[in-house]
Image (tube, rainbow, N blue to C red):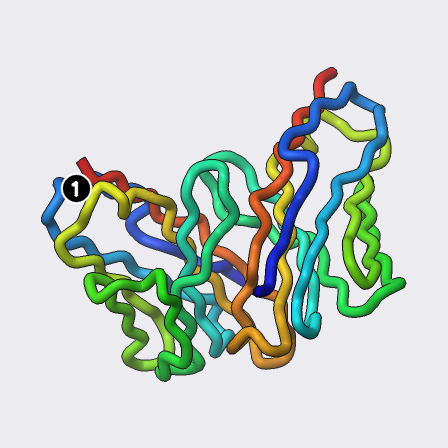
Amino acid sequence: EDQVTQSPEALRLQEGESSSLNCSYTVSGLRGLFWYRQDPGKGPEFLFTLYSAGEEKEKERLKATLTKKESFLHITAPKPEDSATYLCAVQSSSGGYNKLIFGAGTRLAVHP
Amino acid sequence: DTGVSQNPRHKITKRGQNVTFRCDPISEHNRLYWYRQTLGQGPEFLTYFQNEAQLEKSRLLSDRFSAERPKGSFSTLEIQRTEQGDSAMYLCASSSWREETQYFGPGTRLLVL
């Protein structure tokens, strides 16, 4: 069964303190791995799509990487406005039409 | 370019009542998805439309749930005889045939009393 596990569940950082969020997945054929940011009471906001092991994508203070078993979201010198829940999702080549399978997310709090 | 819109944003209802939610996808997107999210969890897939055809339904979608996309544009999700366990955020997403990325709307938060 396709599955996504994110760790840690919650992370507290001081402003400027870099860290990484982990997304481990088991899937029968990866079509794509997606990172989203979600603020309280809002819908997920798209960040990155990764398709193959070794691929990396960057946007401002965020960098996403992908291996055959996991993905990392690296946050460099975070600011308080980076506080949110970060969701990881996979799309399986055998799991039906295009649906995303999400992890439970990592709640990030960045304090000044 | 407007994003995905959902209405209403919030809905409070009594157990046993029927509710209907609407989703308007990004204009050129032919694929539309419904997800449900409960507190502290990631979104769970409910159903998928390509144009007006409903191509996939999750086992989560009981007989009380029905979704339509009559002209391949907006979609509605109806829940009949609501139960307290239906309380959740209902999210709509859309994507283009050109790319896999799904773009989400702001969601409809349902509270069943």
Dot 1: few (<14), some (14–19), or many (≥20) neighbours within 10 Å?
some
| As drawn, A55 above or below B38 | below
Is B66 on the left or on the right of A4, as rendered?
A: left
Residue B79 rendering spot, x and y as whole percentages: 21, 58
Is A42 on the left or on the right of B24, as rendered?
A: right
| As drawn, B3 above or below A85 | below
Towards the viewer: A6 or B65: A6
- Residue, far front: A1
Q: Quadrant of the C terminus of chain A?
A: top right
Task: Please identify the quarter of the rendering in which residue A78 is found.
Answer: top right
Is B100 on the left or on the right of B42, as rendered?
A: right
Q: Tell me the residue that label 1 is attached to.
A: B13
Residue B106 rendering spot, x and y as whole percentages: 44, 48
- Residue, far left: B16
Q: Residue at x 46, y 56 (%)?
A: B44
Identify the chain of the residue marked 1, using the numbered disc in the image.
Answer: B
Q: Residue at x 11, y 49 (%)?
A: B17
Residue A25 rendering spot, x and y as whole percentages: 69, 57
Number of callouts: 1
| As drawn, A14 above or below B20 | above
Q: Residue at x 84, y 24 (%)?
A: A16
**SS under mark 1:** strand
Q: Residue at x 75, y 40 (%)?
A: A21
- Residue, far right: A54
Is B33 on the left or on the right of A11, as rendered?
A: left
Towards the viewer: A7 or B22: A7
Amino acid type of the residue tagged 1 in the rendering: Thr
Q: Quadrant of the N terminus of chain A?
A: bottom right
Residue B81 rendering spot, x and y as whole percentages: 13, 54
